[in-house]
Image: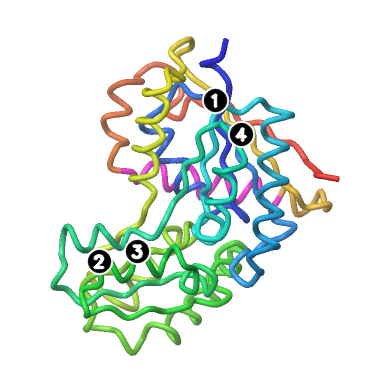
């Protein structure tokens, strides 16, 4: 049946797990195919043309091989650079994340705000439009070059050193922090160690709500089964790296999911069986 077709998620690595966890909490019956493009991680330092071409290849594969009914671009850089092109080319719904700067405007516009994102995201036309529309004139933009890759590698010491060097000058000055890369929510505790008690904003919840709205509008919700599956795909040619990515994905995904504000209500909905009722599979994909 059409409604049981999976939703495809794409990211340069495991950062998109922070988006997938929110979508799973809202849409537990759906099947998901998560594509981790670790062979080309990070995206933040790549050209617009390279990112568009790569995302086009991935989405084409997800449609042809897995018959995805919708795509979530769970990477801010890919969203900023490629979403307009992809929406013109493909007929299926494409939901794209963006830095949650509007949330600051809605919730705490007078607080000093730090936007952490990749260089590619901050330089994009899409972000410029967002920024100038909601600019509170109390905002600092930081291009966190290499941060997503450090988080991807799971090196805690290197991560703490990077954040201390990058963020220390803002300690005690910042009220709002926009996490403009889907990897960054995985480092919230380490960021808090440097900046203290700040308000965090990221686009994962908004994208997940939009995914639910779109599936409802197009009558694509999966109501045929009590639980769905997650298929994890990784593009690395190295089996060792693929296994490392899957292990990191599992660890980060489960932790982030359990700390989601939706978690308690989800448990009430799903008291039977496993706390996280999705079945994990893994596969290796080349796009040649």
Residue 187: x %, y % from top left: 44, 64
246 magenta-colored = yes
CA gap, disc 3 to disc 2? 6 Å
Residue 230: which quarter of the image?
top right
Q: Start and end of the magenta stretch?
A: 244-260
Q: Earlier in the sequence, mark 3 or mark 4?
A: 4
- Quadrant (top left, top right, bottom left, bottom right) of the N terminus: top right
- The circle drawn on residue 33 is 4
> Which residue is pictured at 24% across the width and 69% down the height?
198
Residue 65: x %, y % from top left: 74, 29
CA gap, disc 3 to disc 4? 29 Å
Magenta stretch secondary structure, dominant: helix
| Residue annotated with mark 1 | 31
Numbered marks: total: 4
Whether tag 1 and tag 4 are in contact, CB under 8 A, the answer is yes
Q: Residue furthest right?
A: 288
CA gap, disc 1 to disc 3? 32 Å
Residue 207: x %, y % from top left: 39, 44
Q: Is residue 125 left or right of residue 248?
A: left
- Quadrant (top left, top right, bottom left, bottom right) of the C terminus: top right
Q: Nearer the viewer, residue 28 or 271?
A: 28
């Amino acid at each position: 049946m059409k409604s049981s077709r999976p939703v495809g998620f794409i990211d340069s690595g495991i950062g998109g797990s922070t988006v997938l966890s929110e979508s799973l909490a809202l849409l537990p019956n759906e099947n998901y195919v998560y594509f981790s493009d670790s062979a080309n991680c990070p995206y933040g330092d790549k050209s617009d043309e390279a990112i568009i071409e790569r995302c086009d290849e991935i989405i084409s594969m997800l449609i042809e091989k897995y018959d995805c009914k919708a795509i979530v671009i769970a990477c801010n850089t890919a969203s900023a650079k490629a979403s307009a092109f992809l929406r013109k080319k493909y007929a299926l719904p494409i939901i794209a994340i963006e830095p949650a700067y509007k949330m600051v405007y809605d919730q705490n516009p007078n607080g000093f705000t730090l936007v952490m994102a990749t260089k590619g995201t901050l330089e994009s036309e899409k972000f410029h439009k967002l920024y100038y529309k909601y600019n509170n004139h109390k905002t600092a933009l930081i291009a966190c070059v290499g941060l997503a890759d450090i988080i991807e590698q799971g090196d805690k010491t290197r991560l703490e050193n990077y954040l201390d060097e990058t963020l220390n000058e803002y300690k005690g000055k910042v009220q709002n922090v926009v996490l403009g890369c889907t990897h960054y929510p995985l480092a919230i505790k380490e960021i808090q160690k440097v900046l203290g008690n700040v308000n965090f904003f990221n686009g994962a919840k908004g994208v997940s709500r939009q995914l639910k709205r779109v599936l409802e509008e197009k009558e694509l919700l999966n109501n045929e089964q009590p639980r769905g599956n997650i298929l994890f795909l990784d593009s690395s040619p190295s089996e060792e790296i693929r296994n490392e990515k899957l292990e990191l994905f599992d660890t980060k995904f489960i932790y982030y999911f359990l700390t989601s504000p939706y978690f308690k209500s989800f448990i009430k909905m799903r008291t039977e069986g496993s706390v996280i009722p999705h079945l994990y599979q893994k596969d290796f994909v080349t796009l040649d």
